[in-house]
Image (cartoon, coloured by chain):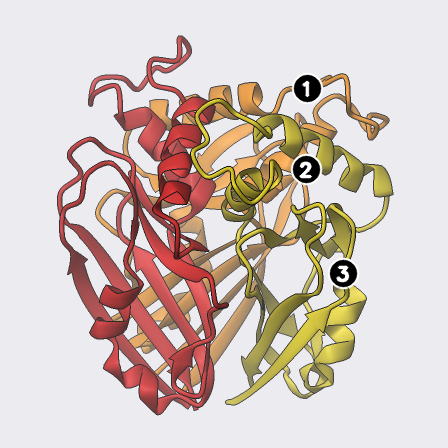
Chain colours: A orange, B red, C yellow
Amino acid sequence: MKIFQQHISLKARERGFHLVTDEILAAMPELKQIKIGMCQVFIQHTSASLTINENADYTVRKDFESHFNKMVPEKAPYYLHDYEGDDDMPAHIKASLLGASVNIPVANGRLALGTWQGIYLCEHRNHGGRRRCVITAWGE
Amino acid sequence: MKIFQQHISLKARERGFHLVTDEILAAMPELKQIKIGMCQVFIQHTSASLTINENADYTVRKDFESHFNKMVPEKAPYYLHDYEGDDDMPAHIKASLLGASVNIPVANGRLALGTWQGIYLCEHRNHGGRRRCVITAWGE
Amino acid sequence: MKIFQQHISLKARERGFHLVTDEILAAMPELKQIKIGMCQVFIQHTSASLTINENADYTVRKDFESHFNKMVPEKAPYYLHDYEGDDDMPAHIKASLLGASVNIPVANGRLALGTWQGIYLCEHRNHGGRRRCVITAWGE
């Protein structure tokens, strides 16, 4: 059983949902050495998140942004944590709804994603800056 | 440390939440060889998902379907991605809210689930068809 | 590759979101033996959950409780599963939205959390009692 770990920084992106599968793969070339295993990507922030969803039509990612903004609105009258900007508290809630990590099986040196699956970086802040991630892969 | 992986296909089910714990267990008999470890089930689709919840009363699963349909409605006026049917874009959002995988500890050759926990296949499409999953288990 | 597992019980807490990072760490001293690896905390219940979010300002945790109560209300007219109390069915739904586990990379004998990240126990019942968790850590 082997295990590999890379600490990376994803470039700053605008608020919204962004496909980052290729960047993740480029940062973990050791995946090719794993015949059966797992790969985890973990984001070290609480106002951005990671999820897996459709990798083709960009309107899916637009609709994610629209729907999350409605489901977790800014300026809800019950927010107490409001001194870091209107986008801050919704960003925390969205981050927990989507999660801080994606855990993907590895088969024959590749992520065993379905045909239409890609990894999204979900940027919930207006100006989130670079986002640190830890990629860990293990298997044999 | 051992690792096992199985690629399976869950039979087509109607839209809703379905208990699949027994099917998962049947597909991974090697679990018995693991004294301490982990088991992951990953679904290779973006309009169905997996979660862990109550394994007893079927009305819990009915209420999941009702609530998710309200929280993520069809025909929201802001959806741009609407050419694959009214159930498609909500299916993508529900899938990310619930997640593409469940990660369950293994203890003494069994999933270390609580008494009331079971694995749900969450079928978000009206006609989703068979659903491919990858089961990976590791430990010693 | 080493693997460790601990079964613990978190003390009963009131309904809401609670930081438990220190309790988790105290229960898994073997983490120090792992240079590169992973740690999973899994909750064996369907009406409480685990997530990762801001570890500083307690108003973030208050706002989580307020928002989840709005997003998943009690006494929704479509709930069929209502005989275990008004807080029961919402608790199940919240538990699946947030998830039964957190999966955190380990680097140099420590959880590789970001500066502001902590582990939340999300207690969704009014009187949930003690909550059993399984902590599993592996790596080399």
What separation in Å lies between label 2 and label 3 (alpha carbons)?
A: 25 Å
**In x, y percent, where is residue A140?**
34, 83
Name which residue type carries label 2: His
Q: Image check: C117 left or right of A108?
A: right
For badge 3, the amino acid type reads Ala
Characterize the local packing of mark 1: few (<14), some (14-19) or many (20 or more) Cα atoms within 10 angstroms.
Answer: some
Separation of residues labelled 3 and 1 (CA atoms): 32 Å
Q: According to the image, label 2 marks what residue?
A: A92
Quadrant where the N terminus of chain B sits is bottom left
Furthest residue in direction front, as rendered: C83
Circle 1: residue type:
Glu
Tell me the mark number nearer the camera, choosing from 3 and 1. Answer: 3
Q: Which residue has dot 3 on it?
A: C12
The answer to whether A93 is drawn above or below residue B106 in the figure is: above
Q: Give the image location of residue A83, x and y in percent.
A: 86, 26
Residue A131 in the image: state x and y as whole percent: 63, 46
**In front here: A94 or A85?**
A94
Residue C98, horizontal then vertical, whole percent: 56, 47
Q: Going by the picture, which residue comes out furthest to the top?
A: B77
The disc numbered 2 marks a residue on which chain? A
Q: Residue placed at 34% from the left, 33% from the top? A: B92
Quadrant location, the C terminus of chain B: bottom left
Marks 1 and 2 share the same chain: yes
In the rendered image, which residue does mark 1 sit on? A74
